[in-house]
Image: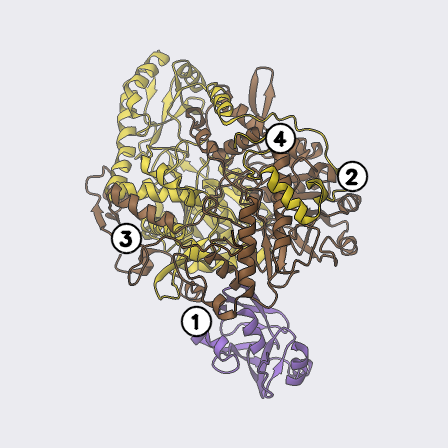
Chain colours: A yellow, B brown, C purple
Amino acid sequence: MTNFPSTQSPYTPHTPADVEAMLSHLGFESIDDLFNIPPPIQFSDSFKIQPRSEHEIKTELKGIFDKNLPLVEFLGHGYYSHYIPSLVDHISDRSEFLTSYTQYQPEISQGFLQVLFEYQSLIVELTGLEIANSSMYDFATSIGEAALLSGRISPTRTKILVPDILRSERLSVLKNYTSNSGFKIESYPTRDSNTDIEKLENLFSDDVSMIYIESPNSHGALEESIKDISEMAHASGSLCCLGTDPIALSILEVPSSLGVDIVVGDASVLGLPNAYGMGVGLFACRSDYLRKVPGRLVGITKDATNRRAYTLTLQTREQHIRRERATSNICTNQAWVALRTAIHAAYLGPHGLINLAKQCIELPLELSSKLDTIEGVHAPSHSRHHFREFVVRTDKKAMEVVQSLEVKGYAVSAIGDHELLICVTDTNSSHIDAFVDAFKEVIS
Amino acid sequence: MSNSPPHYDQAKWTSQSVYEPLLSEKNMTEVSLDGVPLPPNLKRSSLTLPSLSEPELARHYTRLSQMTYGVDSGPYLLGSCTMKYNPKFTEDVAVLPGCSMHPDRAPHTIQGTLEILYTLQEHLATIGGMDAVTLQPPAGAAGEFTGILIIKAFHESNGDFSRNEIIIPESAHGTNPASAALGGYKTIEIPSNEQGTVNIDALQAALSENTAALMLTNPNTLGLFELEIELIASMVHKAGGLLYYDGANLNALLGRSRPRDMGFDIMHYNVHKTFATPHGGGGPGAGPVGVVSKLESFLPAPIVIKTKSGFDLFTPENTIGKVHGFYGNWLCLVKALAYILRLGDRGLLDASAKAVLNANYLGSKIQYEIPFRPFYHEFVASSGDQDAAEVAKRLLDYGVHPPTTKWPLIVPQALLVEPTESENKSTLDQIAASFNAVLTEDQSTLKSAPNSTASARIDQTTAARFPILSWHALDPSL
Amino acid sequence: MTFSIPDDRIYSQSHEWALVDSNTAIVGITDFAQDELGDIVFLELPTIGDILIKEQIFGLVESIKAVSDLYAPLSGTVLEINSVLETEPEQVNDDPYNTGWLLKIELKDLSEIDTLLTAEEYGSQTS
């Protein structure tokens, strides 16, 4: 379309003859005649946005992105990435997948429906829970949706318990999701990076709707008392919700067998590279809650030839039918990201997933023990099992360490005056030794 | 070239009982976790998942893609979804190396990322006439919810705690009342008038000191421009309420009218609609929210600001907090910016012009009745004696992804058609010919459709009566 | 289309029916209602011992295209529930007046009976 004038969008395929013929058929002189906008609200100014060619935009945006410092990131704190096999891009970019929308016409959308069904099945296998939806926006909003689900199950209860080390961003989203439905959020203490079980016991009452726990948690530690916590919750009539991710779940004890009722998290650790916080919300729960579950569900049925087929089902709970009494306001979700997650998981298979999860244990062990040899550094600062990341205590002020490491080309997070959170996965493991050396120099 | 429409045959493999087998039906493997360095009480005993080679997976997914239909496959008429062409170069921009930063990077180390976000904030503000924009909401419905929270915070900051009602037209998209309910509001629905637009008397009756806001889309879901929008705005403002714009139909107005100028105080944009980011089979999208200056301090945190030394993240003084764990659907935002830069002023104006031209031309060639006019970028036809859902199934055989059916309710047997600006005259002629062919077909033809899609007519009842939502439920031995 | 409206029972404006027998009544939804709903997939009904209050919501019925609230035609206490509907919700479509019955209740206030519609009155309302 390079021979079209720049007064056009490059993506409108009309020739001048087309336009003339169409207008003539309609009996109008110009396209302007199709609009009846009252003059006072007509916009006749310019946006002052110059159009550019593809080539110009790629060059321009590359130049802008080059302003980002090329630091080696040892960042995690709830958002992680791993190597994505090439198959994922090449399949998910197929335009039938990429340019389709929600499968309102299942007969022509069997392919995408089947992928989402396989994604749901993956999550069911990992969580042990019977229902998994085909995606929510992200980790934080999934926690919010879980809280609302717990409210539909126990309408008289109004309290949600959350760990004191919960990322503040997640807490903020949870508050926004729940405060207008009469919920109160209360935090429970963690001790040495795990739930303080003794103190938790006192917090349960018949007003608690749900307790939310994380494993691995915000400090990279695996929660060791999930079963005790869920038993405590159930004894007082509350639900137990676990936040986690699919790679962790491939080796951790199955949540359903630990008494967990709802599992949430970010499934984009599989399938999505580092994307500045964009993810896909994982959501799974017990079959008892089937009619109260938020989000889209793909189910099996048959078609008129009696063959097995797939369709979106139980849509009457959703906003387009139930409106203000819907289980959620979600419409467009993260389906294409879930597709990528499913492909990545299929590529790895059970062996690959377990190996990847093993690395998430072994790499932090390796890095933390190397850092621990440095004078003035104590790593990991909690004697727990870690997954991808761990807390490091430094005699030096954490922010100074962060800034000095940045000068040396590394990005890390400070989470306290003398505490840093260090994350290591297959994406940065080749830098371990250089990082340790840099750390040594910075500390001395 | 005759006017009879072409026929569509979707590719598929068929066996006796299924089309493409599930991965679970190909080499399910149970792996034990003996080698994993964790104490037994913390780890599962085994993991059972499909184990396939890359060639097998490539075939499996390629076949599934062939049994899927996108904008690149053919016309996609879903109303209020704006299924326009997704430019491929935006995909390449989204994988530029500097694009993949961790969200916890300190602002001074990601000046490029922040510049991209700031530029998009600015351009969207300009396009909507707004003073400030947040890019955080990850979808249109999330944008609506964000808007509701801002409206609430605004009224409460004025000591106004009694405003607990949101007025919404009957014809509004379901996410509107659902989002209002999520915000703790009561929904007051008002009917349309005989022309299909907002019933001013009904609006007057619904407005009170309990009104927090009126949510509208313009053009509305019948494709009609709300000619009395200035009056509506003044009525709502006089009652002390705010006016919210649902941006789903913004594709009709780019460069011709801006929500701010119509009197809207707050709006959301749908980047996957108006700004051409791919719909991805159900998302991701993004729903940025734009506000007038008096609402700026309530925006979600953080927004990107420009300082003397570059760009920074800023927490608005009265922020409502967060509506996404990080910064929203970053990759969609990058693609939207790339699209805006490609089109520029004139391109955006042209996109709307052609969208409206296409809808009007298509509407004039389709022989189904269209009761409400004049429409802009979409129209609602009625299939009359034919069931709209059945008409949709038959359209699939002609390779036309059907319009939205049986909604809005004001038109019986509604077909909400939005061709977008991406179709040319000859494909519009083909689409019209498809509709007109279906119009002449008898009930048994419609009932037996579709015949040439991957699967035949789906049994929705069985799916809902006995929900089977995983391969485990299908085969309990797994 | 003509809908079945048996003479032996009384009807509410919201398309429920009641078959009264001294101080108990069987309750269900009408042929018109099941037709409007389409294929019924699920019902949410109260449990034995629950109290129904006339014109208040006592449950819901879900079809593939809609979810509809059920309104109590008469006040009373639930004695029995048609448990067959848990596995065969389609009975409500196939035979809304017999095998598709919903509940049996013990009536609280027999004078409420007069406020409901006769078959003829309900028939002219739905035509």
Give the amino acid at mark 4: Thr
Residue at x 55%, y 73% (from the top left corner) = C35
- Mark 2 = which residue? A39
| Mark 2 surroundings within 10 Å by alpha-carbon count, few (fewer than 14), some (14 through 19), many (20 or more) | few
Left/right placement of residue B433 relative to residue B171 reads left
| Mark 3 surroundings within 10 Å by alpha-carbon count, few (fewer than 14), some (14 through 19), many (20 or more) | some
Left/right placement of residue A415 relative to residue B15 reads right
- Residue B310 position within the rendered picture, expressed as x and y whole percent measured from the top left: 56, 18
Which element carries disc 4, helix, strand or loop? loop
**Of marks 4 and 3, the one in the foreground:** 4
- Classify residue B423 by image quadrant: top right
Please give the chain letter of the residue carrying mark 3: B
| Mark 1 surroundings within 10 Å by alpha-carbon count, few (fewer than 14), some (14 through 19), many (20 or more) | some
| Mark 4 surroundings within 10 Å by alpha-carbon count, few (fewer than 14), some (14 through 19), many (20 or more) | some
Question: Could you say which disc has been placed on residue C86 in the image?
Answer: 1
**Marks 2 and 4: in contact by CB < 8 Å?**
no
Q: Earlier in the sequence, mark 4 or mark 2?
A: 4
A19 in relation to A3, above or below: below
Relative depth, front residue between A406 and B49:
B49
Q: Residue furthest front?
A: B1
